[in-house]
Image (cartoon, helix red, strand yellow):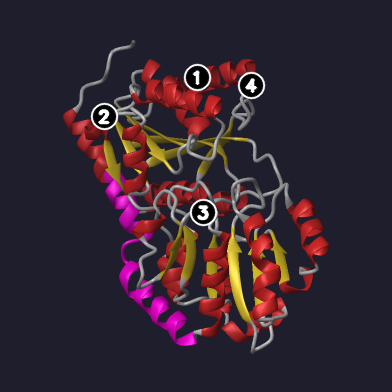
Amino acid sequence: MRIVHVITRLILGGAQENTLLTVDGLHHDYHDDVVLLTGPAEGPEGDLFDQAAHRGLAVEVIPELVRAIRPATDARAHGRLRQAIRRLKPDVVHTHSSKAGILGRAAAWRERVPAVVHTIHGLPFGPFEKPLKNRMYVEIERWAARRCHAIVSVCDAMTAQALAAGVGRPDQFTTIYSGMNAEQFLNPPRPRAQVRRELGLADDEIAFATVARLFELKGHDDVVAIAPDVLAANPKVRFVWIGDGILREPLKAELKRKGVEHAFILTGLVPPGRIPELLGAVDAVIHPSLREGLARVLPQALIVGRPVISYDVDGAREVVVPETGVLLAPRDLAGLKDAVLRLAREPETRASMGAHGRARFADQFRHQTMTREIRDLYERILNGHPTRARD
């Protein structure tokens, strides 16, 4: 097949890693002709361009395809996408993320691409966004849903939320879990003790990792809020933040103000290949994000064998069950504190939850499974749907 994937930024992030693994699998395993169109990697999060080049993947940058809403720039990005699609003549255009999903679907539909697919990694609207922004995004997503043949959700919760908002038709949706290199998480490349020493963790310290950009709605401020009480009850608890972002300095200032900076280890940006060994080095994972889709770190932690504490948002409940971790109402700070202290004092519970998650999710989240299901979806569309006429 000739396939074009479109994403706004090829930064270090779950949606981007998902997309790159899909492109990689289609190219190397199915020998498809695949091109990834992306905007510039703005921001401090780091990017995946070197990884794409190392794997021999075709990537084209469209400078106008930016994350911020800029009507004039967005119109130019739409034009550039149409030009690229016209030149590449794909059988399939598969879009990712909200901005690229809107512009990419519009361009592909106008160019009469036989199969137009969009993946919802996380909806742009939700209970923690401003009402006006929610209304705008709901209307735009409804419009864009009418310009694609299929919508992939990374969890069942995304489908339910989209349909509840009037986005898309039930027959358009299919759930395909976000894949990863499971073998790296089943067998981290370096010993736990060595990585702990490098992080500065003592043998008797209990470390809780958070893997996320230091950005709004990621919940780092909730971890800061509970830290004084947690450390007063158990001084051996440590928090390891993996990732970087625009809130790094404000969060560091707040840690210092509360007098808890000694208990926090900020790794900054790390290559994706280091995530397995870092998760293997800690004792549990906290994921306090308020909007996520299905965060990759949840199954990643469980495949490594670490229990998770997560807010009950989006698809978290599809992997965080009583046997694998603790699910909390969003912004339940008392519950978050109690869950951290419970797992800190109960090593047998940590071991049991981690073992259950490892056994339950390793096969389900392999990237080969994801790519096979996505390609099967392409074939079903191409075999069953004629090219749609222009609106």
Image quadrant holding the N terminus, namely: top left
Q: Residues within 10 Å of mark 1 (few under 14, many from 20)?
A: some
Write the start and end of the magenta stretch as one range: 347-375
**Residue 317 drawn at (x, y percent):** 37, 57
**Judging from the image, what secondary structure is the residue with disc 3 in?**
loop
Front of the two marks 4 and 2: 2
Label 2 near label 4: C-beta < 8 Å? no
Label located before the other in sequence (3 or 1): 3
Calculate the distance from the C-alpha at mark 3 to the C-alpha at mark 1.
Answer: 26 Å
Front of the two marks 4 and 1: 4
Residue 388, placed above or below residue 241: above
Could you tell me which residue is drawn at 65 percent across and 48 percent down? 215
**Judging from the image, what secondary structure is the residue with disc 1 in?**
helix
Front of the two marks 3 and 4: 4
Which labelled disc corresponds to residue 83? 1
Calculate the distance from the C-alpha at mark 3 to the C-alpha at mark 4.
Answer: 33 Å
Calculate the distance from the C-alpha at mark 4 to the C-alpha at mark 2.
Answer: 29 Å
**Judging from the image, what secondary structure is the residue with disc 4 in?**
loop
Q: Amino acid at mark 1?
A: Gln
Calculate the distance from the C-alpha at mark 2 to the C-alpha at mark 3.
Answer: 36 Å
Residue 349, placed above or below residue 211: below
Closest to the observer: 130 or 96? 130
Q: Residues within 10 Å of mark 4 (few under 14, many from 20)?
A: few
Front of the two marks 2 and 1: 2
Image quadrant holding the C terminus, namely: top left
- Residue ID for mark 4: 70
